[in-house]
Image (cartoon, rainbow, N blue to C red):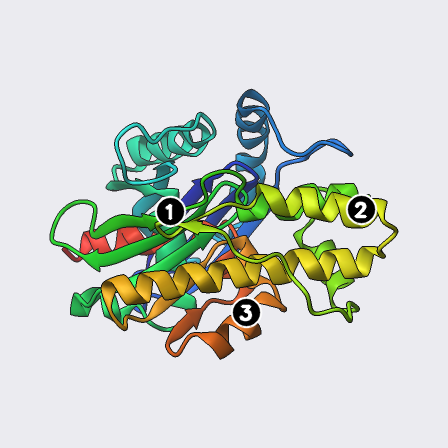
Amino acid sequence: MSLILGIDSSNYTTSVALLHMETGEILQQEKMLLPVKVGMVGLRQSDAVFYHTKQLPEVLERLHFRETFFNESLYAIGVSEKPRNMDGSYMPCFLAGLGVARSIAAITGVPLYRTSHQVGHILAALYSAEKLHIIAEGKPFLAFHVSGGTTDLLYCQSIETEERLKIILCATSSDLKAGQAVDRVGLQLGLSFPCGAELEKLALNATRTDYLKPVLHNGNCCLSGLENRCKTLLEQGDTPEEIAGYCLRSIEKTIAAMAQYALKKYGDLPILFAGGVMSNRLIRPALEKEISVCWFSEPMFSSDNAAGTAIYAKMMTQS
């Protein structure tokens, strides 16, 4: 049995994955969130690099190379080396994962395939939604990558180059990203960073149905007003549950408006939703009602993960 190792050192998660080369199945994923001090809304890149350097050996030691896959052989390695496939895209945190991947490749002699964190997100989400075949078929699709650092709406299509995916940015947030809005509102409510899961629990008990009207300019959204509005609601005495619901509904309506913009511009294409924000149990069903053809992944493949980099390496070995 041949295995492919995937590595991703994103801004808030250290993750590795093992993929079965012959079947394409993700056999195991191991993740560790980077520690963030209470009350803080993020990490400096120097701290992120330090924690990845510390955590990568631990998550790799959790992989069942010896216990479960006794006769396995390492066939290839996939790793994220930058946030996006575009000129100038760079974050130091990806150097940690890249360094480990290069070291393993140098020692073992197996090929190393580099891609972006965003491509990894898209491929992992397609895998989870059982839609990876669209890559082999060369059919275009739209994809949302919505997380702490992105609120990107993308046009995607497979191509016969090293990148494998042609990605065109259709629209984005011109200020605050959706994940940042979730975390900042969560911190206003006294939640722990990252705040997505706790904010969702609060919102499940909300009863009001109003939201901040989406503001789009050529498809690009503005979300800074959401943070300010939630702060006002808190000062007026609204409950944490209602504020959480207001925040998540507003994000959902904004994403739906961006999706309708893209469908008018590019035609009736399927839309894939990836990124940690898209695993929210309130946002997903609402979008499924508003968009005719949409694909979602399971939470473990929607949030930051190394499965997509392993899938990318498999695609490259077969090209």
Instruction: Name the amino acid type tagged 2.
Output: Leu
Q: Residue 243 falls in which quadrant of the image?
A: bottom right
Q: Quadrant of the N terminus?
A: bottom left
Q: Which residue shows up at 25% across the image and 37% down it? A: 109
Identify residue for label 2: 189
* Viewer can see residue 126: no
Q: Are marks 1 and 3 in contact (CB under 8 Å)?
A: no
- What is the C-alpha distance between the residues marked 3 and 2? 23 Å
The label nearer to you, 1 versus 2, is 2
Q: Dividing the picture into quarters, in which one does residue 47 lie?
A: top right
Rendering quarter of residue 69: bottom left
Considering every residue shown, the one lying at the far top of the view is 46
Rendered position, 46 above or below 246: above
Q: Which residue does the numbered mark 1 point to in the structure image? A: 118
Q: Nearer the viewer, residue 138 or 183?
A: 183
Residue at the location (20% across, 53% down)? 317
- State the image coordinates of residue 60 (x, y, percent, origin top left): 51, 43
